[in-house]
Amino acid sequence: VSSVTEYYSDGTWTQRGSQFGTLGNFGYSLDVDYRSEPGFAQNTDLERLSLYAKAKWQVTPDDSLFLQLNYNRYDNGDT
């Protein structure tokens, strides 16, 4: 597990986190990345959220199954 939070003097802040591991023939990772910026004028703020999930299953010594999911959301002002 890892996590990092950063705050900047302009009011911007970020948060990143990660979790990964294995269980028998199954491996996974989960990641999150969030950023918030207040903007420099009215309606110029920004908010971003990204989520990532990966999984791998070793079915046989020669065959594996891999799954990757990504989610991204962006919200910002209209100027």
Image (cartoon, grey):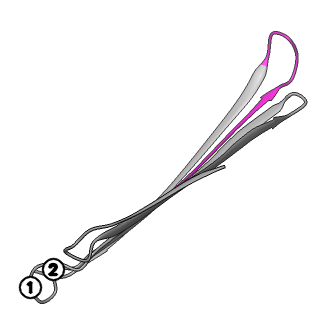
Secondary structure under tag 1 reads loop
Q: Is residue 68 above or below residue 8?
A: above
Residue sitting at 74 percent across and 28 percent down? Answer: 65
Quadrant of res 55? top right
Find disc 2 in the rendering and name its residue: 44
Tell me residue 23's x, y (percent): 87, 36
Magenta stretch: residue 47 in it?
no
Q: Residue 68 carries which label?
A: none
Report the span colored magenta.
Answer: 50-63
Q: What's the CA distance linking mark 2 and mark 1?
A: 6 Å
Identity of the amino acid at label 1? Answer: Ala
Residue 5 visible within the image: yes
Residue sitting at 27 percent across and 71 percent down? Answer: 12
Quadrant of res 22? top right
Tell me residue 78's x, y (percent): 16, 82
Magenta stretch: residue 51 in it?
yes
Q: Is residue 61 above or below residue 18?
A: above
| Screen quadrant of the C terminus | bottom left
Identity of the amino acid at label 2? Answer: Thr
Q: Residue 41 carries which label?
A: 1
Secondary structure under tag 2 reads loop
Q: Which of 69 and 23 is in front in this view?
A: 23
Residue sitting at 72 percent across and 40 percent down? Answer: 28
